[in-house]
Image (spheres, grey):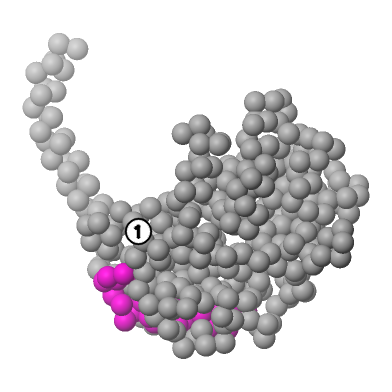
Amino acid sequence: MSQASPTTPSRGPQRTLLLSLLACAGALVGCGPEPDLVIYVALDQVFSEELVNDFEAETGLNVRAEYDLEAQKTVGLVGRIIEEAKGGTRCDVFWNNEIAQTVHLEHLGLLQPYDSPSAADIPAEFRDPEFLWTGFAARARVLIVNTNLVQDPGKIRGMWDLHDPAWHGVCTVARPLTGTTLTHAAAMYETFGMEEADRYWRFIAEHQSESPPAVNVARSNGQVMTLVADGQLAWGWTDTDDFNVARLNGKPVMPIYPDQMEGPNGEPPMGTLLIPNTVCMIQDAPHPDNAKRFIDWVLRKEIEERLAHSRSAQIPVRASVDRPPHVRDNIHILKVDYDAVGRNMAAHTDHLRKMFLGE
């Protein structure tokens, strides 16, 4: 021990220099050559990375794709785009797995228009009138049901069944602060009004201290799927892509497309929420020409078809695109003003954070 004292200080500067050199070398290896295109991707990496790699191989472009984390779904990348706009935009294209946060970026003035020829046959409701974003390859918000635990799935028909005392403690939803669950909640506020949407979400938030809570709050849609598929809970809200993963894994699950029944006086069905992917070019994109090339590529009918037939089972927004039998095309869709949802997204997020986190 007596010999260690004089030698330790002399190694300090050398060790610091060595660590610095290693860090620099790691940075050079990690960064590689300057990219021809930078894409931020919120669609699950397991579903989107293969497509990005195919685009890179077909075009010969050096693409840097940065993917979102499940726990931060969408809001993490959106926050980065907002922050980078203050000091130098890095991202060229944002491939979002939903629509509300994209419209939020539009209202912040962070998108630039591009009328892609590949989008000519996409229905108008999935395109921004000013061509700031385009929707494609949608998911539906469905109720995933464990058929071993729910003997009569027909008793689960709509969104309000989550409040039914018969299901106390055995149903679940992701915390509505990220991803499509946040989009879902924001759409409810815009579609049903403040009082009705608050009644829905406050019931869930205010019962969290109970054991078990009336509705279990999960971290993400993926966790909802796992809890139900593994039989820990009976049913809950998730997206069709998460359900399809459970289906392919042989789990005893089925989807219920909620609110497909007529009202008590013959009113049209309220409908299921449909959430398309969206793609957009960022304002001041460093590589605008290559950004347009990618947008043209990803909006092709062939890509929607691939996504429909993939594990993510995305729902084509074009009726003419081929899809497998398990990808439904006869759904009553909830009518939503997505412009209003995106415009008020920050306020909805703050409101829900206070409700669920007390912030």
At x 19%, y 51%, the residue is 24
Q: Nearer the viewer, residue 34 or 355?
A: 355
| Residues shaded magenta | 282-306
Q: Is residue 188 magenta?
A: no
Residue 202 appearing in the image: yes
Q: 192 above or below 6? A: below
Instruction: Give the percent coordinates (x, y) of residue 195.
Output: 64, 45
In the structure shown, which secondary structural element does the residue marked by tag 1 occupy? helix
Q: Nearer the viewer, residue 101 or 320?
A: 101
Tag 1: residue type?
A: Ile
Q: Nearer the viewer, residue 311 or 202?
A: 202
Toward the top, the furthest residue is 2
Judge from the rendering whether residue 286 lies leftward or rightward of residue 200; answer left or right. Answer: left
Task: Say few, some or many: other residues with alpha carbon within 10 Å of mark 1 (under 14 / 14 to 19 / 20 or more).
Answer: many
Judge from the rendering whether residue 21 lies leftward or rightward of residue 50; answer left or right. Answer: left
Residue 50 appearing in the image: no
* Residue at which label 1 appears: 81
Instruction: Give the percent coordinates (x, y) of residue 278.
Output: 50, 69
At x 41%, y 56%, the residue is 77
For residue 203, which quarter of the picture? top right
Quadrant of image for the N terminus: top left
